[in-house]
């Protein structure tokens, strides 16, 4: 069986790990100690985890975050989510096909119960990501008795999946550092406070009317926590969209992809196509390239990507095609993804017949937006428990904004507890507002008038919050005039230290050096392994938009571990280039243009799956809406949509979209009532059973 482990990475350190044995469907496989069943199966080349009991459809992963119900398997006789359950030595895993046979049970066996443990804290924080950790730091400084609960085996939230350098302010939110390094720094700060307790691998189940929060501690013991104040920093879940083939194994979210690749070092694809041009999709595509995965292309339905232009340009410079004003028509395959068809759309977002392109690929990454995980906050408010929300649970924004959001909520909680006097500094709110700004105006690219000496070329021309280049320059040669949102400007006086090239989060700065001969030397950031290019190679040089300018000779590499005290871990490559193109050189092409076939257009059929758990189609729901149903609870009762294990987390917005497509506006239909539990848990665990006998 082919090994899909990542053995080399330009950013992540590959360290030996203890291996353990487990079985899947009777076959003995190897896993790394501490990894999930899903990651272990993917590492062994297994993409189909089971078949749906309703129609036999193949199932794999989708969110890899415990939010959906795609990846269930039977592990040691118990139905579990493969993405959230750790592999154990000797574990026997089977696909979940049809309805599982219940384990035999001795009804005369004695079952002992124990009281459910209860804990009291001043503050309970659900979520150990950037918002939760920063809030905890503020509380820890005032010795507030605080509990952080997180469902993963390490703190940091999505930061532990982010190998790229962050934007924002160096002083305020660690701009220039990589997400993985920021996560470590925030965790170190939190763990230094003795009044902060941390429960990892622990899932918040629900907020109840008695103002207690049910938690599955260590994935095995059910407990209750009664906080004075609840802070919900539980992040976000990924949205989905409707298209034929949307539930095939190999179609999954960006977070799932980054979890497999950047956390678990599993090569989750060989040929990848990305749907969605926000920062999440653009960054995930770049991460794929770093992991040695071929990125076939990326499509975005809007005329321009929604993410930072420098993220798009990182892909273009490497040779990845970005198709704006395009949407997915169909994903092809029987048991798993085999190809994708996209097509151009008009100004009304209608598919233009005759513009179809079909690309062969084995994986389709869906990155079409996020929804806040806000259920805990909503229930707390309903039941009168004092609660706050921070980070993506409050509003979807960048991680730098989440750090400030957590800091602000920390101060607001201190104020509520009577431990902070006076007004919270207004500049905190102002900084957060700037950090969560959407990408702004794109200006015309301008090049320095001088053609001698050494100087940086700033390919950063969009209004985004970012200042590492100005902060790090020892000669103050680069400045931002006015707001931090404005693009940087070169003012002269460069000495060629290359610090700005190394620290730029957008890889948008090149250094042109005319001092060593007729053919200038251009220094570029290059975050890939030595297998891509080597000294002496003649490489294809691209401008910021991916246009090939000509050839250049690679003359040296230099790895930069730190810029001053900021860990950047960036490789700088020097290329000798023709004088006439030197200023425009911004990247090196390493991806060959993909080939595609024309594919006849197909209308999206009514059999597109809306509810993954219960396999309810768009046609079934459209029929009810057209018959006059205006209550999502009635749709649930009639079709079972939203009744599955994920509790409507993935289908809610799709059903709302169907109402909208049928001309029923929001407010003209009743949304369904969210009920406990938030995540699945066995009845025995809830009841406090001491022993679970006869489980096989």
Image (tube, rainbow, N blue to C red):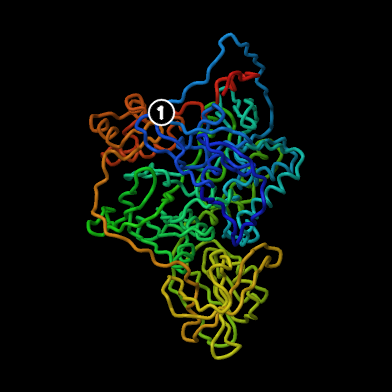
In the picture as drawn, the residue positioned furthest to the bottom comes out as: 518
Residue in view at x 27 percent, y 36 percent = 619
Label 1 Cα crowd, 10 Å radius (few <14 / some 14-19 / many 20+) = few
Quarter-of-image position of residue 320 = bottom left
Quarter the C terminus occupies:
top right
Percent x, y of residue 106: 57, 12
Quarter of the view holding residue 8: bottom right
Question: Residue at left 47%, top 80%?
Answer: 551
Is residue 254 visible in the rendered image? The answer is yes
Q: Is residue 438 left or right of residue 522?
A: left
Task: In the rendered view, tell whether residue 596 sits above or below residue 389.
Answer: below
Q: Is residue 430 visible?
A: no
Image position of 382 (left or right of 99): right
x and y percentages locating residue 148 in the rendered image: 65, 38
Q: Which residue lies at the image location 42% right of the left edge and 67% below the top edge? A: 592
Q: Nearer the viewer, residue 17 or 299?
A: 17
In this rendered view, identify the residue nearer to me: 570 or 629: 570
Q: Position of residue 436 (x, y in %)?
A: 52, 54
For the image, the number of numbered tags is 1
Most distant residue in the top direction: 108
Q: Position of residue 413 (x, y in %)?
A: 64, 39
Figure check: 589 above or below 616: below
* 582 or 228, nearer to the observer: 582
- Residue in front for this viewpoint, 15 or 326: 15
**Residue that label 1 marks:** 98
Question: Is residue 610 left or right of 160 when viewed as pictured?
Answer: left
Secondary structure under the numbered disc 1 in the rendered image: loop
């Amino acid at each position: 069986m082919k090994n899909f482990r990542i053995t080399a990475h330009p950013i992540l350190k590959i360290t030996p790990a203890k291996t353990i044995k487990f079985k899947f469907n009777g076959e003995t496989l190897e896993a790394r100690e501490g990894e999930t069943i899903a990651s272990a199966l993917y590492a062994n080349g297994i993409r189909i985890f089971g078949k749906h009991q309703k129609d036999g459809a193949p199932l794999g992963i989708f969110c890899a975050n415990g939010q959906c119900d795609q990846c269930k398997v039977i592990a040691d006789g118990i139905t579990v989510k493969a993405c959230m359950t750790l592999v154990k030595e000797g574990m026997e895993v089977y696909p979940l096909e049809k309805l599982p046979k219940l384990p035999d049970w001795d009804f005369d066996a004695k079952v002992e119960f124990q009281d459910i443990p209860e804990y009291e804290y001043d503050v309970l924080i659900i979520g150990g990501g950037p918002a939760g950790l920063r809030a905890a730091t503020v509380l820890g400084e005032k010795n507030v008795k605080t509990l952080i609960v997180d469902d993963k085996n390490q703190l940091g939230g999505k930061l532990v999946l982010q190998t790229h350098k962050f934007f924002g302010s160096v002083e305020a939110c660690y701009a220039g550092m990589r997400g993985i390094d920021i996560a470590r720094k925030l965790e170190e700060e939190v763990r230094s406070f003795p009044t902060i307790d941390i429960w990892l691998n622990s899932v918040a189940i629900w907020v109840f009317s008695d103002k207690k929060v049910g938690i599955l501690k260590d994935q095995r013991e059910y407990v209750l926590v009664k906080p004075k104040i609840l802070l919900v920093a539980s992040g976000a879940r990924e949205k989905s969209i409707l298209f034929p083939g949307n539930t095939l194994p190999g179609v999954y979210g960006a977070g799932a992809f980054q979890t497999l690749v950047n956390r678990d070092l599993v090569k989750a694809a060989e040929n990848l196509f990305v749907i969605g041009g926000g920062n999440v999709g653009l960054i995930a595509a770049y991460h794929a390239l770093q992991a040695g995965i071929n990125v076939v292309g990326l499509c975005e339905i809007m005329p321009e990507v929604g993410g930072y232009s420098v993220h798009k340009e990182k892909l273009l410079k490497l040779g990845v095609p970005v198709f704006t004003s395009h949407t997915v028509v169909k994903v092809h395959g029987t048991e798993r993804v085999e190809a994708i068809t996209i097509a151009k759309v008009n100004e009304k977002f209608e598919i233009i017949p005759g513009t179809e392109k079909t690309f062969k690929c084995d994986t389709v990454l869906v990155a079409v937006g996020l929804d806040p995980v806000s259920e805990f906050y909503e229930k707390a408010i309903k039941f009168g428990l004092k609660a706050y929300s921070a980070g993506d649970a409050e509003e979807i924004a960048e991680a730098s904004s989440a750090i400030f959001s957590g800091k602000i909520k920390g101060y607001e909680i201190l104020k509520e507890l009577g431990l902070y006097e006076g007004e919270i500094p207004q500049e905190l709110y102002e900084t957060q507002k700037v950090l969560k700004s959407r990408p702004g105006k794109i200006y015309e690219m301008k090049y320095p008038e001088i053609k001698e000496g050494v100087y940086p070329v700033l390919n950063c021309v969009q209004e985004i919050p970012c200042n590492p280049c100005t902060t790090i320059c020892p000669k103050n040669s680069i400045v931002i005039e006015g707001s931090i949102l404005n693009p940087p400007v070169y003012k002269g006086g460069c000495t060629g230290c290359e610090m700005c090239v190394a620290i730029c989060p957008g890889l948008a700065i090149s250094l042109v050096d005319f001092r060593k001969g007729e053919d200038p030397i251009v220094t570029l950031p290059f975050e890939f392994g030595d297998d891509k290019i080597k000294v002496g190679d003649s490489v294809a040089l691209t401008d910021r938009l991916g246009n090939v300018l000509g050839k250049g000779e690679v003359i040296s590499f230099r790895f930069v571990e730190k810029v001053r005290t900021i860990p950047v871990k960036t490789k700088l490559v020097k290329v000798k280039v023709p004088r006439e193109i030197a200023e425009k050189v911004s990247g090196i092409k390493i991806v060959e243009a993909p080939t595609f076939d024309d594919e006849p257009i197909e209308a999206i059929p009514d059999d597109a799956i809306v509810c993954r758990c219960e396999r309810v189609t768009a046609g079934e729901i459209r029929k009810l809406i057209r018959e006059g149903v205006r209550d999502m609870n009635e749709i649930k009762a009639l079709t079972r949509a939203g009744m599955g294990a994920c509790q409507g987390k993935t289908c809610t917005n799709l059903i709302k979209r169907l109402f909208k497509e049928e001309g029923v506006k929001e407010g003209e239909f009743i949304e369904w009532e969210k009920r406990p539990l938030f995540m699945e848990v066995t009845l025995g665990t809830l009841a406090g059973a001491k022993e679970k006998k006869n489980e096989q």
